[in-house]
Amino acid sequence: FSRACQIHRLNEYAAYRLAVLYEQAERPKDALAVVDLYLRAGGRDRGILLLGTQIALNGGFYEAFLLYESALPKDFSNPLFDAQKAIALFHLERYEESRSTLEAYERTWEITDQSQELFKTLLEMKTGKGEWKTKLLSDIGIPAGAEDAFLFGHNVNLFALLWENVEELASDDLIRGRYLDFLFVHGEVPDKYYQDQVDWGVEENEENEEESYEMMPCWRCVLRQPLDPSVPAWAGWNCIPQSETAYRAIWFVSHPSQEEAVRLALTEQAKCYPRPAEIGEVTEWGNYMVPHPHIAAMGPREKDSPE
C-alpha cells in the first residue's frame, strides 16, 4: 500500500488502507502523514478525510483535525462530527469558537443532554464569563445519564477537566464537597485526589525521606454493588444502563493486610451508592514503596456479568 501511494498519491483505496494499517500499528503520526500527502495532492475523498479526523482526535492532534474538517464538503455535517469540532477547539484553548460551535450544534441537531450543560460550565470556567459556581451546583443536581452523547467517550474526560478547576477551591468549600460527591456517584474521582490525601512525609524528613517509606502490597478489590431501581445514581461516565441490577467496582488499595484493604475499599464505595456493596475477587497487584496504607485509585465500573 505504501508503494501504491508513492506511485499515485491519489490512489484512494491504497491511502485509506495504509492509514488504517498505521493506526492499527499504533503509529498515528504515520497514519496522518498518509492523509496529509493525499490532501496536498488534491484528494478530497470524504472517507479518507473522516478517517484522518478520528485518528487526529484520538491522538490529540487537534490542529490536524481542524485541517481535515475544513477540507470536507461544506454541506457535510453529522451530530458526532459537529460535537467533536467543539471539543477540538476547546483543547486548542479557542474557547469562544468552541462555544459558538456548541451553540450551532444545538441549533442544528436540537440535541441537549447533561454533558453539554457541564461542558458549558467548563467553558465559563475557562473564559471567566458567567457564574460558573452557581451553574455547576445546578448541573450536578442531575446525574449524567447513559444516553448522554455529546462528550462521553469522545476523547475528553469532562469530569476530570472540571475537577482541575474545582480542586483549587478551599477544602471546606461547599461546591468542592458537592462536586466530589457527584464524582463518587459517577465513579470518576481522579486518582490525583487520593494521591493528594496521602501525607508523603517529605517535608518532615527531607534529609532521609526514604526511611518514611516501606514496601507494601497493593490490592485489587472487586466489589459487587447491588442497585436499587428507586435510586438512579448509577448512571454516569461508565454508562451503566438502568436495566442493570448491579455493577462491579474496582478499587486499588495499598495496605499490609488484605482484610483492612477490603475494609477501606468498602468505605470508599459507600460514598458512591447508598446500598452496601458485596466483596468479590481480591488479588494482590504488586508491591510498592509507600509511606502508609491508603486508597491508590478508583478503578473502572463494569457490568455485573461481563460478556
Image (tube, helix red, strand yellow):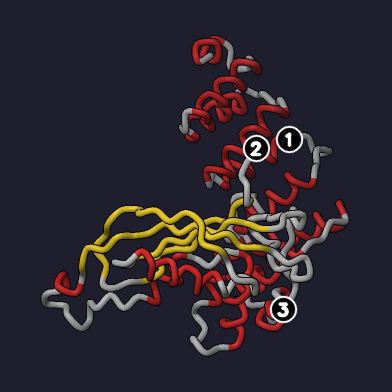
Q: Residue at x 53, y 67 (%)?
A: 189
Q: Is residue 51 left or right of residue 269?
A: right
Q: Residue 297: x, y in percent?
A: 44, 63
Which element type, helix, strand or loop, lies under badge 2?
helix
- Mark 2 and mark 1 in contact? Answer it, CB < 8 Å: yes
Q: Nearer the viewer, residue 126 or 166?
A: 166
Q: In the rendered view, tell whether residue 168 sits above or below residue 276.
A: below
With 210 as the anchor, is 270 left or right in this view? right
**Label at residue 72:** 1
Position above or below: 120 against 54:
below
Crowding near the residue tagged with mark 2, few <14, some 14–19, many ≥20 C-alpha atoms within 10 Å = many
Amino acid type indicated by mark 2: Tyr
Residue labelled with disc 3: 135
Q: Nearer the viewer, residue 77 or 118?
A: 118
Badge 1 marks a residue whose secondary structure is: loop
Residue 68 badge: 2
Mark 1: amino acid: Leu
Binning the other alpha carbons within 10 Å of mark 1 as few (below 14), some (14 to 19) or many (20 upward) gives: some
Residue 28: give x, y in percent of width and height. 50, 34
User: Three-letter amino acid code at disc 3?
Assistant: Lys
Q: Choose top left, top right, bottom left or bottom right for residue 54.
A: top right
Quadrant in the rendering for residue 20: top right
Q: Is residue 247 above or below residue 133?
A: above
Residue lying at 27% horizontally and 57% vertically, measured from the top left: 287
